[in-house]
Image: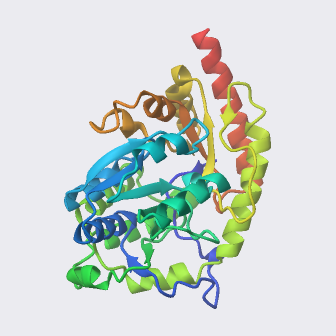
Amino acid sequence: MFVGGEFYYDGRWMTAQPDLDTSGMYFLNGGQACLRVIGESLREMGFQRVLLPAYLCPSIIRALEPAGLQFAFYEVGWDLSINIDQAARMVTEGDAFYFINYFGFSPALSVQFFIRNLQQHGILVIEDNAQAGFPPESIGDFVFNSLRKQVPYDGGYLKSRFDLQPIISRYSGKPNRRLPLIRAYRQRLAGYLLSGGDDREELQALYEQAEKLYGTDGVVCGDLSERECIEHLDWKGIRQIRRENFLYLLEQAGSVPGVTPIFTRLPEGVSPYGLPVYLDPSIRDRVLDSLGDAEISLLVHWDEIAAHPLTRTNRQAVEMAGSMLTLPVDQRINRKQLDYLAVKLAGAVAACQQFTG
């Protein structure tokens, strides 16, 4: 039995009529492309520095670096909440403020109030919905997502109160070299997982080739056929299944000794990206490997923090990344698979704890 991993094509979630209103949004080839456009816009408006959360994917830094921006980092707690007091002391005129809706969860109302107050004082706000998809509300001056983290289609939607078309038009006609490769991969992956009819090593090589191009293609205008598919997905149904899976797995995994869920409640409107949990860092990687051997693919957010020169000095962020695992709750997963995941997780944690002891 397999659980999680990369998305494959699944027609069960397609609808006859569009289920999504994307009017006023720009459509690019992914979240990193959205960030590059945001960086160029900030530079052209005269902004010089971006305040980033200390706990983040370093690819965010890489996407903004070409704009020549400077970076400073504010603290994020173990519960993924923003340290408002510290951030308030750091922010100055001419800064942009970047925040992440981690795993699809919006920040607390007190944090939202703080962010809106920044905007009233001329601070531009970038809202990262890469893990949130299409939340009911957004407050950023720039808001973007990354759909490949939610569904088997490529693209990122970017919304702003500023006219970004002059920047985006510079990339008109640029080819998307990744797209045919990742499409072939997703098609073959479905066959491999559902019927075993493909070579695993060839699939992995194809995926790695596509991922390399995602990092080097830069900004590409989004593919219209991908956009058509994205906007004809049953997003309400996807959100509902993710919510049901999250709550069920929270109950199952949350009762496993040594497993600590970060979010213990699910607010209305949230479409959870996954169920992030903390483990003892001394056993985290062995648990990850054990579950991988059981065909359970989990994500780590984000080990690269410990290696990147701008993030590795933040001890707490490094420790958070070294302790966390994200359990999948997406729309492909059924109750039987969740039970299998919970049993294997409990067994792996117990075995690793016994070995360590």
Residue closest to the far top: 357
Question: Which of 296 and 139 lies nearest the eye of the viewer?
Answer: 139
Q: Where is residue 127 in the image (x, y as percent from the top left)?
A: 48, 62
**Snapshot colouring:** rainbow
Residue nearer the viewer, 85 or 214: 85
Residue at 53% x, 30% y is 323
How many dots with numbers?
A: 0
Residue 36, image x and y in percent?
29, 66
Q: Residue 104 in the image: state x and y as whole percent.
A: 60, 57
Q: Please give left or right for residue 218 compared with residue 318 in the image.
A: left
Q: Is residue 282 above or below residue 130?
A: above
Which quadrant: the C terminus? top right
Outermost residue to the bottom: 17
> In the figure, is residue 338 to the left or right of 147?
right
Quarter of the image holding residue 226? bottom left
Q: Is residue 2 depicted above or below 228 in this figure?
A: above
Query: Residue drawn 78% across and 33% down?
Result: 255
| Residue 296 visible in rendering | yes
Side of 31 relative to 266 (left or right): left
Name which residue lies at 58% across and 44% down: 81
Report the front residue among 48 and 331.
48
Q: Report whether 41 appears left or right of 228.
A: left
Quarter location, residue 193: bottom right
Q: Is residue 83 visible?
A: no
Task: Give the residue drawn at x 55%, y 68%.
Answer: 139
Residue 17 spot, x, y in % from top left? 63, 91
